[in-house]
Amino acid sequence: MERCSRGHMQAKKRYLILVSAGACLVLLFYLGGLQLPAARSRHGRSRIEQPWPHYSDPLQVFLPWDQTDTEEYNLHISPRQKRDVNRSVYKSKRCRMDSCFDFSPCQKNGFKVYVYPQQKGEKISESYQNILSIIEGSRFYTSDPGQACLFVLSVDTLDRDQLSPQYVHNLKTKVQSLPLWNDGRNHLIFNLYSGTWPDYTEDLGFDIGQAMLAKASISTENFRPSFDVSIPLFSKEHPRTGGERGYLKYNTIPPFRKYMLVFKGKRYLTGIGSDARNALYHVHNGEDVVLLTTCKHGKDWQKHKDARCDKDNAEYDKFDYKEMLHNSTFCLVPRGRRLGSFRFLEALQAACVPVMLSNGWELPFSEIIDWNTAAVIGDERLLLQIPTTVHSIHQDKILSLRQQTQFLWEAYFSSVEKIVLTTLEIIQDRVLEHGSRSSLMWNSHPGGLFALPQYSGYLGDFPFYYATLGIKLHPKFTAVIHAVSPLVSQSQPILKLLVAVAKSQYCAQIIVLWNCDKPLPAKHRWPATSVPVIVIEGENKVMSSRFLPYENILTDAVLSLDEDTVLSTTEVDFAFTVWQSFPERIVGYPARSHFWDSNKERWGYTSKWTNDYSMVLTGAAMFHRYYHYLYTHYLPTSLKNMVDQLANCEDILMNFLVSAVTKLPPIKVTQKKQYKETMMGQSSRASRWADPDHFAQRQTCMNKFASWFGTMPLIHSQMRLDPVLFKDQVSILRKKYRDIERL
């Protein structure tokens, strides 16, 4: 009986186990936990079976991909679904130049940028239109897609916040229908705003594929190093070209201002970006640390206001933002809803050292800019330590930081044009690695936009780095004489000028640029000199050819001369000696000035003989040969064509260029009294200075050039450099430059 009972119990256990296992299998199959092999069709191909949903996750609303960027969907999407969206958007997160960029068209045609033609009826914001216009007006632009290295969309991608009126719908369809899209390869997408309430993700709402992003408020997590470009957040009022200069006053020593640390902005009561700003009141003392916030924004702010709102709002209204900005040493830049903030550019311009409080933000142009020299990088988690940190920074360091904010503002951030061109130059440096800029070129005056690496890979070939590198200048100069008149007499001014220049102890060689319609004179017509004289026939006989970067120019210094200039050997020697101390500037004799004509509301040009000047004409001026290269390769064809058509204004354009680069005026040196009457060939029939339209043309040129530069780069000066003992009541035998004293 005992054996039978025991056997019956074991059978019962086995039965229960089998029933339980069967129930588990049914349940697993029902819940989708067990995947059965896909059924085969008659043709042998797998028929994909959709798995059952996991009921432990929220149910997904079934929507096609191109409908998932609607406001309603975004408001109800779960965090997990958002992560999935981000994965799809950034599925090319591992993209780098060597894996997602085709270098071959760039190596074949150079760095050329193509902008897709705009479609009729396509909505486009003013800011994005500015970006496209800047690219189309740059030296990188090509209208031929077959020549392009980089492609830029004509559909507006700047604002991808679905609640914004600038949001472009169905962008995925529009982009993928482009015949040259090629999964975004060699494409650049500009973006200022992405994501929307409440999480403000970096989702652009369409698959960017292998395209590069030039994006504001991009996080280090999503930033693809040496592929994407982090750009600053700028407002629609940001100047298209030119832009205002920084507000740092010269020689601001000591560097301390009325306030040590300031901030004035919105406070978010809930949601992303609220933590840092909500905690600022802990550090605010109302004296040297003034951190003001207001919750008075948005339609329903009163419904959500907290106990501090009324007090904060009252304090907020007591202070003027601009007054604080221009009178503070440091400016706090906390994150807002997104990582970037308008406060960043405002602080830079005001020479208020930015204190960054936005963890995870890839700072603008981080690939090229050393932000440790211009900003304090804080940590949101250590807010209470910020006042102690900024108080501990030595005043020498503060002055250095403030000076660097001004350099960076003016070099890369003061206009939309500079932001866009800096972005393109960064990408060009990656594409043409052999000709890329060094960190010194990007982070020191005059900046990467004016230091073109295609000119030379050696910093000593530029006029900006001699002092930094401890390099000595070439001890001699090359004279370039611009000849436009036939050689008919041995008493012509050009021959006298050639002899006087050749006698200079600093002259290495003389180049005569023959822009005359008559044939080149025979060699025996030129006077015998102790230095080589090279005669070059001008390219197309146009005015701009005098500033071509001729290979024959082997010295750093170029003495530019008109054929009818009257200069003595002593004057040439003195000008070169002065130039050696100012190699980045134009140094010379004939000075002119500009002024604002308030009646006509335009710039005017004057040749009045006064102490004030802003230009030194290139009829008798010394400058670095790099400016020949910059004039030829940096300036637009439209301006050079204007100069060539008028046969005028090339000297004004060169002054505009050099002052735009240096942010400094030229330098006038002393000349003989009779120089005023004889300079620039007043008696020469062939001289263009005798043309009655000449002066009116130069007025027109001034305004055309100022329009292209977006500002007036010329700077007034009253400085004149004279020889030591000039006009002193001592024996002339004690003076080195005696001829300059004589009439």
Image (cartoon, rainbow, N blue to C red):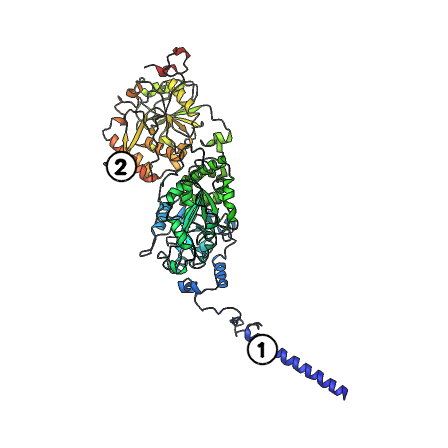
**Would residue 126 appear left or right of 341 to someone viewing this image?**
left
Most extreme residue toward the bottom is 1
Identify the image quadrant of the C terminus: top left
**Would residue 222 appear left or right of 700 to someone viewing this image?**
right
On the image, the x and y values in percent for residue 444 come to 46, 36
Q: Quadrant of residue 485?
A: top left
Residue at screen point 42% across, 12% down: 734
Marks 2/1 in contact by CB < 8 Å: the verdict is no
Q: In this view, does 383 lie above or below 396?
A: below
Identify the disc placed on residue 26.
1
On the image, the x and y values in percent for residue 593 come to 30, 29
Q: How much space separates mark 2 and mark 1, taking CA atoms? A: 87 Å
Residue at screen point 31% across, 39% down: 707
User: Which sits in the foreground, 418 or 502?
Assistant: 418
Q: Earlier in the sequence, mark 2 or mark 1?
A: 1
Residue type pointed to by label 2: Arg
On the image, the x and y values in percent for residue 377 come to 50, 45
On the image, the x and y values in percent for residue 509 come to 42, 23
Q: In this view, does 336 lie above or below 259?
A: below
Q: In which quarter of the image is residue 402?
A: top left
Please tell me how many numbered marks the rendered image carries.
2
User: Which sits in the foreground, 303 or 460?
Assistant: 303
User: Which sits in the foreground, 525 or 121?
Assistant: 121
Identify the disc placed on residue 602.
2
Q: Residues within 10 Å of mark 2 (few under 14, many from 20)?
A: some
Res 40 seen here: yes
Res 103 seen here: no
Residue type pointed to by label 1: Val
